[in-house]
Image (spheres, helix red, strand yellow):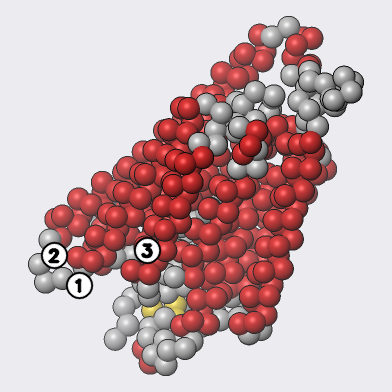
Amino acid sequence: MCEEGYVGEAAGCTECDAGYGMSDASVLLCVKCAESPWVTALQVCFWLGKNILIFGLAAKSVLGASQEAKSSSIFLNQLLSFATVAGTIVSAMLQTPAGEDLRNGVTGVLLQALGIVMDVGSGQSASTGQSTQCLLEYFGLQPSLWKGQVAFAAMAATLTTALGVAKGWHVAILVGINCFFPSFLGHFGRQLVCFRLGEREDLYCPHAPGMGFAWVVAAMTLSTAVILVAWWRLYNHSKHSKSGESGESGESVEPLPVHVVFLTAPYDKAFAAWETERLLRKSTFTLLAAVLPVTASPALQMSSLGLVLLASLVLNGMLLPYTERRWNLVEAGQLATCLVLIFAVAGLLASDPHWGQSRTIQVIVIMFTTSLAAGICSALAGLTVRAFVLEHIAKAAMPAKNRSAD
């Protein structure tokens, strides 16, 4: 007998019932779609709003870049990175039996609010249980994984094009890739897991792509290569000197474009392209979480995600890429906190099937972990907004001549 919202007992109860849609967090999780027009409009606005908000903040940060690293841009990049990781971890934790009980109880509203904080910070839908498949149904479309990816890509392309027309294509490509590439790669991961589940006779993925495994891998590889090449080409202008410096012949060299300043200003010259590490970390994390859903491969997912975080922590600790010591410490602290979250979820997953489990301890772990993740996301968001305001005030107080030069 399948649980509420699931059908297809012969296929492992993996198909969503009428009125339910596949969650963006996992292809094996079904969430209830909206029934009233008001809730429908709210879900559509939230899906669009969180992406537009984080895209707008990122665009403002890039356009406001100066030759000196600005706190707002560093805080924003750290918010995007931490929220992506924290949202994925919390989503895995809430898919445990204890997490399901809490989400369906009186604490569900609190967990939903905390999830919104992380999803807004990352631009993803890992924590709130939102379903792109439900959004497709609202517009009269037949739900499928590839249609969800096309809808997401269309939204990302529209925002990127609008920014490119208004402010320049280098800035638009940088902001678009930084905000949307990890989620775009995660959509491929949700398709790949369907092929992996198809190897088992007792499970069935109802929205598996019809094109075949090889074609999905080829499409993912090709699109990833194109996006990463476009990202790397953004660094081409870094061979120019910064404003006020001179070339070898003593002649003045044109200043760095704002998109290159945004990418390179926080880091030492030897690690000018270090922002690529953060992009690859977010993308790999999102892809692994999608390919290895916690409901099917809990231990493998947590160990894989933990290895990604550990590798980043070791690299940052050994190389210290930031020019300022405090940013290296903040980055290390965030990565260490993410590892603590991983350990907490791994312990929670290990205790679920154990006869000596304590539901009280599980509830404490879930609430502590979720509150910690949401609290850090809120703090980073607050620091980002505060830095934006202070920088705007400082710029307004500058003489007109200096302001135009900046």
Q: Which mark is residue 273?
A: none
**Please, what secondary structure does the residue beneath circle 2 have?**
loop
**Please, what secondary structure does the residue beneath circle 1 have?**
loop
Q: Which residue is mark 3?
A: 303
161 or 176: nearer the viewer: 176
Q: Which residue is mark 2?
A: 357
Q: Which residue is mark 1?
A: 353
341 or 101: nearer the viewer: 341
Q: Position of residue 252 (x, y in %)?
A: 87, 21
Amino acid residing under circle 3: Ser
Amino acid residing under circle 2: Gln
Check disc 3: other Cα within 10 Å, few if <14, some if 14-19, many if 20+.
some
Q: Residue 225 appears in which quarter of the rendering?
A: bottom right
CB of mark 2 within 8 Å of CB of mark 1? Answer: yes
Lower sequence index among marks 3 and 2: 3
Check disc 1: other Cα within 10 Å, few if <14, some if 14-19, many if 20+.
few
Q: Which residue lies at the image location 61% right of the left edge and 32% below the top edge?
A: 268
41 or 328: nearer the viewer: 328
In which quadrant will I find the C terminus?
top right
Check disc 2: other Cα within 10 Å, few if <14, some if 14-19, many if 20+.
few
Depicted 142 relative to depicted 180: above or below:
below
The nearer-to-camera label among 3 and 1 is 3
Relative to 182, is 290 on the left or the right? left
Q: Which residue lies at the image location 29% right of the left edge and 61% below the top edge?
A: 346
